[in-house]
Amino acid sequence: MRRTSLLLMLLAAPAWAQTAPPADGPITCTSPVSVTDSAKSLMQRYGQEAVTDDQLFTGVEDITYQGVVLSPKAPDRCIEIGFADETMQRVSRLTLIDSKTSHWNVAGVTLGSTLAEVQKINGRPFLIREFFTDGGGFVVDWRGGALGRLLPGGCWIAVRFGKGREMGAPEGDRISSGDARARKWAPVVEQIVVHFPEK
């Protein structure tokens, strides 16, 4: 279980700050977060639904980073936001993680999506990194499919699969989403990252 020591350093927000959680649905390159957002602007926009946290996990080993969490008390609505540097003036990525399902989706992909569902959205089979390695389960090649293209606005999606059945995980450095063994093991999407352009 990831550490959840929130700093709770709520920046002073103006009286008009939003108190309800951000609306759910599709995540785009500009909503509910854009590349030009800072920690301060998110605190002002979302009020108590935005907190800073210096123990956010990348999903690789024990590497953590400081960022902002939207809707931290609702795992199925939670969004973790990382920044280009420690000044937190420019968004570099947002992450959906640590929940079996989510009210959010990116290009139709959401937490809990199956291999078959993601392959249908992509339009063709894709390749996944071997599951039981550092960074295992991430899609490494969309093989020219729809999910390998930039989203409108210039951001792009990374997807990680995991949490399959107890036994029968497929082996191999690059595993096809169409592999019968992989389908039988039944992994689902456990992490979605939207990367924003640097400039």
Image (cartoon, rainbow, N blue to C red):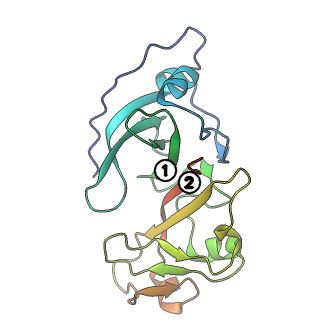
Task: Please name whichever residue, 150 or 119, is drawn nearer the observer in this view of the structure.
Answer: 150
| Residue underneath mark 2 | 194
Q: Position of residue 10 (x, y in %)?
A: 40, 20
Residue at 54% x, 20% y is: 44
Inspect the image, locate mark 1, and give the three-letter code of the amino acid beneath it: Thr
Inspect the image, locate mark 2, and give the three-letter code of the amino acid beneath it: Val
Residue at 50% x, 14% y is: 13
Q: Position of residue 18 (x, y in %)?
A: 59, 20
| Residue underneath mark 1 | 95
Disc number placed over residue 42 in the picture, else none? none
Residue at 63% x, 81% y is: 143
Residue at 66% x, 47% y is: 29
Asked if the residue at tag 2 contacts the one at tag 1, i.e. Cβ–Cβ closer than 8 Å, the answer is: yes
Q: Position of residue 128 (x, y in %)?
A: 49, 79
Residue 56 image-quadrant placement: top left
Q: Image height check: is 94 above or below 113?
A: above
Q: Position of residue 59 (x, y in %)?
A: 36, 59
| Mark 1 to mark 2 CA distance (whole Å) | 6 Å
